[in-house]
Each structure stands twice: as C-alpha cells, then as structure tokens.
Amino acid sequence: MAIVVQRKPLTWLEKTYLPQILGGMKITLKNMFRPKVTLEYPEERPVIPDNYRGVPTLVKDPNGREKCVSCQLCEFVCPPKAIRIWPGEIPEDAETAHVEKAPEEFEIDMLRCIYCGLCQEVCPEEAIFLQDIFSVTGYTRDEFKYRKEKLYELGGTLPDKHFKWDKKKEAAARGNAH
Amino acid sequence: MDFTSFLIIVAQGLAVIVVLMSLCSYVVLAERKVSAWIQGRVGPNRTTLPVVGAIPVIGPMLTRLGVFQPAADGLKFLFKEDVTPGHVNRPYYMLAPALALVPALLTVAVVPFGQYVTETGEVITLVLADVDIGILFVLAVSSLGVYGIVLAGWASNSKYPFLGGVRASAQMISYELAMGLSLLPVFMWANAPGSDAALNLGAVVHTQQGLWFAIWQPLSAFIFLVALFAETNRLPFDMSEAETELVGGFHTEYSSFKFGLFFVAEYAHIIIGSAVFVVLFLGGWHPLPGLPLHVEGLLGALLSIGIFLAKVFVLVFVFIWVRWTLPRFRYDQVMHIGWKILLPLAVANLVFYALLIALIDSIG
C-alpha cells in the first residue's frame, strides 16, 4: 500500500537555511572535541582476536620440545603449495627419541601462503598455528621464505593440553605401548 | 624620494609579504588539522626536523601539532615533476598561476594591521600604503585574482578546467555587486559630517572605537561575509574547483610549483579577505566593542598587531569550519543566491541605512 508522506512546508526561517547552517556548524564543532578514532599504527596496535589467521608459525610445547613430527600432512594439504618439509630423524640418544621424527628443515614461502589455515586444521600434533602476525615485509624474495628457525622464533611456546608424547613414554615404560 | 627611504619601503613590503606567505603555509596546516579534528582524525603529526624535533618535550609536542609540516609541503611542491601537458597554450598557461597570486599579495598593501600611538597622542596607522581609496583598491585588485583562474581554465585547453574558469568568472560577477553594495552603508556611516575618512581603511577602524560595524550593520556584515566566501572560492561556493564535478576545476592540468602557487593564492585570498572583514566590521585592532585600544609606543603597536592577527585567525578558522561543515551549492543555486537574494538584500540594506542616516542628520 502506498503511503503518502506528509511534508511540512518550510517556514520562512528554514528557507533562509541559516539555522540549519548554524546547527551543522554546532555539530562539527562538537566533533572537534570528541576523542579521535585514529589508531596511530606503528605505536598503537590493533587488538587481534584469538581466532585471527595471521602468519603460520611452528610452536614448541611448554617443555621446549618441537612439536612438529614432519608427517607432511600440511605440506600435502597446502593449496598453494607454500610449505616444504625435509623430514629428519631424532637421534637415538635424545630424550625424545621415541618421537622418532622431526623436520630437518621446514620452509613456508610467504609469497605463496594464502593464510587459509588448512595447515593448522590438518596438523595432528597441534604444531602449526596461524597466530597474530599480520605484517609481512621484506626486500628480497628470499626474505619471504620463512625457514624453520624463523618459524619457531615467531611461534614461540603455546600451552599444551595433552602432552601426548610424554604419556606415550610413560605408557611404554609401564609396558603398554599404546 | 631618496635612496634610504626607498630601501625602508622595500624592507617593509618584504616583511609584510614574508609574514603573509608564512601565514599562508600555516593556514594550510590549520586547514589540514581542523578538518582532521572535525572528522575525528589526528591530522599531520609525523613530520619532524632533525635538531628542533629532538628537543625533549617541546620537539615531540611541535611534531604532534604538525608545526614542521608546511616545510615538507612546500618542498614537495618544489621538487615534484612539473608536467606541462602538450595541449595547453603555453604562455598563458605559465602566466596564470602568477596572475592568481599577485593580486592577493598586492591587496595587502592597503590593509592596515595595527596602530602606533606617539608620545604626543598622535595615532599613526600601520599600513604599507595609506591611500584614501583603500577599499576601492582592495575590491578592484582582489577581483583581478579571478583572471588568474579564468586564464588557467582557458589556457589549459581541456573541458573541466574550462568549465571551472567559466564558473569562476560568472560567480565573480554575481557576487562582486552584492559585495560592493554591502560596503556602501559602512562608508556612508564612517563619513559622517566632520569626518574625513573617505574610503580609507584605517579611518574605518578609527570610527569603530565605539560599536563595531558588525553590530551596527549586521546585514552588511553578513552579505559581505557570504560574498567573501564566494570571492575566495571557498566552500560552499567553490564552483571553480568542485573536485566532485570538475576533477580539479581550473587547476586540473597544473602540477608541482604552479599548482602550489594556486594553492598559496587561495589561502592568501582567505587571509586578506579575513583581514578586510576584520578591518571593516570587527573593529580592527580594538579589543572589544566600546573598548578602544590606546597604548603608547612600541608595546601598543605590537599589542594592536597581535589583537588584529588574533581576530584574523578566528575568522580564518570560521572559513575552515564552514568548509568542513557545508556541502557545495549546486551551480544554479549559487547564481540564484547571488542575483535573486544577496543583490536585492544589499540594495535594501543600502536604502535602509541611507534613510536612517538622512533621518539622523535631519534630527541632529
């Protein structure tokens, strides 16, 4: 149903526009003294939500063990093929020798990465996380190839709920390997 | 005239122009800062100088205020590539920016900016050229400024600058009339019997030792202010620039220093326009209505210049404030306001004050 909007004819004062202009100037003057909305970026940083998908990083567990076991699932799932892993063996005499594998070298090409988060989703060891880093800069292509050392530096240590490999070791000691 | 007095005049002129030009650059800064504040932003706050910016507390404070920004802006205008499009009419294209700036700098010669009271109580107006045709000179020369814009629009030889130039000339014609007519009552009042004010601007200030003309003649002041906005091509009347309609208007084809000259000319016009308004309607260097300034010697002179500049700055702020509040008028609305409203209003205003003055004269 059509509705006819009743429009009041303008009064003489309104036709001069002057009260409206003064009203507008009052508003802009008020705005001048409002707190500013600008975030002065390099000094002030935005609050990053927990589920933000930033740069993929490798993390260690609270005991300082590198969690990646170089299963290469992330390498296979990565849609732009940004991840490359060179699997390596953990030496027999190491404390975590029962984990058996760790990456010898881990490389993510940040020029290829599309921040999809599939690597994080697929990782059975909770070893790779897209954390809060959003600014990726560099001068050469080589600088954008994040190697293992850099990935661990960016990732740091995250709390662990399971301590899966410690439990496995205890179970094995009790004679129950699985 | 001997050589020394010639040198003194040159030095005075240079001093005034240097002050005016630096004021221009800081008005540009004020425009950027005020617009930022009105829009909830911070404005330029990063540019800094190596030594001054490193002073503790003061340096960062000045940097945050953007005090060093005008220098960076100026350097940018100087060092950017100066593109001259192939289709322009070169001599006129080169001439236009200068023609826009020169009238703005010329008008400052007759605008009084302070007073010096000698020990004998004699009042000397501080002005470069104390001519009796003051306001006529201002009106004549400041409207020459539009030639720079029209010439730029025409010499650019492309459609948007051309439209900008055409609009500027039409707008100048329609608002110049109202502007001139709105000033007549002021000078009729200033030239009361026994006064030899003529059209001298300093004398107008002296007649405002009591009430200011803005209070005596609010309609004259209002019409003059609106016409001033139109004359200086400021929003809501910036038809010749109109960046949403005409790309950049008359300066579309200009770059680098030539564009910088147009830019400076616009702000010089604003400062001079504000100064003329202060002289005519806001009592010049007298601090308050009914409270004339009468301090002897150098201190008094500096005080008068300070008060005058403070008033000019307030008016410049109003210019900026209005710009970031109001949208642009449509072109036909601009013509409608100029011809059908302001002009009849100015004529009515003139007739009213003529009758009033005649009445006062016949009684007194």
Image (cartoon, coloured by chain):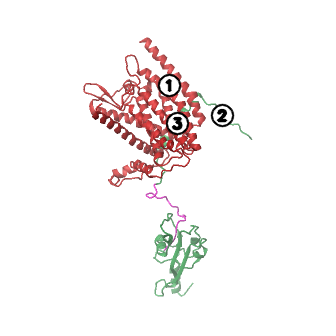
Chain colours: A green, B red
The structure residue drawn at horizontal position 41% and vertical position 44%, both measured from the top left corner, is B25
Q: Secondary structure at mark 1?
A: helix
Q: Is residue B357 above or below residue B51?
A: above
Measuring from the top left, give residue B79's x and y in whole percent: 44, 52
- Judge if badges 3 and 2 mark residues of a common chain: yes
Judge left or right: residue A8 versus residue A154: right
Q: Give, as a three-letter code, the residue at label 2.
A: Arg
Residue situated furthest top in the rendering: B363
Q: Which of the chains bears the disc numbered 2?
A: A
Pick whichever, A125 or B24, lies toward us: B24
Residue located beneath label 1 in the image: B181
Three-letter amino acid code of the residue under disc 3:
Gly
Residue B190 visible in rendering: yes
Q: Tag 2's secondary structure?
A: loop
User: Magenta span covers which residues?
Assistant: A40-59
The label on residue A7 is 2
Which disc is residue A23 wearing? 3
Whole-percent x, y for residue B165 in the image: 55, 39
